[in-house]
């Protein structure tokens, strides 16, 4: 009898409500989904649809008002804040539109920062692999101010992967880049995550970025509004146009 594979990420009726003056607004209105290990999922939707809120709840950066967010079989909503922090540190990688590099640290030091903060020794072989994979060999001693936007985002990707996380969450990772550089950065992110067997979840507004995913999930008004499997950029754009009506 074949054992069912545990989802890498599971959301069960996740609702996130924010206070707005005298009332309450649902940023997420009860979202449920399963993401398979090693999959690449893009999340899209109109502005204000709840994309970043979903990502933050799934990654343990925000706490759902109700429902459950589960990573690798562990329900984040049952953990203490310290336990959630440890789980994120050990099992989750983050890439954001803002690179969030430490200005006075070198490229190598920025990449190793999550390990330094956790008191863990860097894996030199993994570090060398990541520097090669993201195209930064020979730049280990540069400071962030000496890098282009694309290079800085590559540092952020290597930093997100250096702890060997099971899941990598990326929020508009190419949003601040031109289309050519963005395509290169996306390819680096996808290739390295695949090589390391990681689950990749990307929030994006770019149909070409989403078209690189195995599956695209669409949100509207805080709820799932459908999905497409291995779609083209044109199919994604058509769906987004429908949601915007």
Image: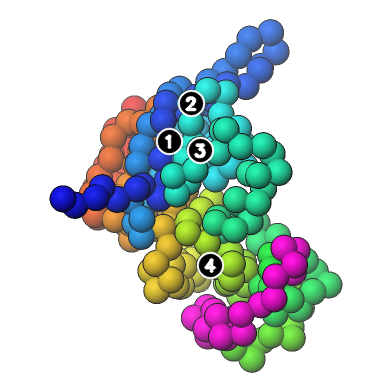
In front: label 3 or label 4: 3
Residue 133 colored magenta? yes
Q: CA distance from mark 3 to mark 4?
A: 20 Å
Precedes in sequence: disc 2 or disc 1 = 1
Precedes in sequence: disc 1 or disc 3 = 1
Q: CA distance from mark 1 to mark 3?
A: 9 Å
- List the single residue furthest toward the right: 104
Element under label 2? Answer: strand
Percent x, y for residue 229?
23, 49
Precedes in sequence: disc 4 or disc 2 = 2
Verify CB contact (< 8 Å) between mark 1 and mark 4: no
Percent x, y for residue 45?
41, 38
Q: CA distance from mark 2 to mark 1?
A: 8 Å
Q: Is residue 208 visible?
A: no
From the image, tell me which residue sits under label 3. 75
Element under label 1? Answer: strand
**Quick one: 38 or 235, which is closer to the camera?**
38
Q: What is the basis of the colouring in this image?
A: rainbow
In this rendering, the answer to whether 234 lies above or below 239 is below
Residue at the spot 43% in from the left edge and 35% down from the top edge: 11
From the image, tell me which residue sits under label 2. 67
Instruction: Give left or right: position of 37 versus 204.
Output: left
Residue 161 colored magenta? no
Verify CB contact (< 8 Å) between mark 2 and mark 3: no
Magenta segment: 116-136
From the image, tell me which residue sits under label 1. 11
**Residue 164 numbered tag:** 4
Element under label 3? Answer: strand
Instruction: Give left or right: position of 36 versus 103.
Output: left
Residue at the spot 52% in from the left edge and 83% down from the top edge: 129
């Amino acid at each position: 009898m074949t054992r069912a594979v545990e989802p890498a990420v599971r959301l069960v009726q996740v609702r996130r409500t924010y206070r707005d003056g005298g009332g309450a607004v649902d940023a997420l209105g009860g979202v449920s989904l399963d993401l398979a290990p090693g999959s690449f999922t893009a999340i899209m939707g109109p502005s204000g649809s709840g994309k970043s809120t979903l990502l933050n709840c799934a990654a343990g950066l925000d706490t759902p008002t109700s429902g459950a967010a589960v990573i690798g079989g562990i329900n984040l909503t049952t953990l203490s804040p310290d336990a959630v922090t440890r789980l994120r540190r050990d099992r989750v990688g983050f890439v954001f539109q803002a690179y969030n590099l430490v200005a006075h640290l070198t490229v190598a030091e920025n990449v190793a920062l999550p390990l330094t903060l956790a008191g863990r020794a860097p894996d030199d072989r993994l570090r060398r692999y990541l520097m090669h994979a993201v195209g930064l060999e020979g730049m280990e001693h540069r400071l962030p101010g000496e890098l282009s936007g694309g290079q800085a985002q590559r540092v952020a990707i290597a930093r997100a992967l250096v702890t060997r996380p099971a899941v990598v969450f990326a929020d508009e990772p190419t949003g601040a880049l031109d289309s050519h550089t963005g395509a290169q950065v996306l390819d680096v992110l996808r290739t390295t995550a695949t090589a390391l067997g990681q689950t990749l979840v990307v929030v994006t507004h770019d149909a070409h970025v989403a078209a690189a995913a195995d599956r695209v999930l669409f949100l509207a008004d805080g709820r799932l509004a459908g999905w497409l499997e291995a779609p083209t950029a044109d199919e994604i754009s058509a769906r987004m146009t429908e949601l915007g009506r």
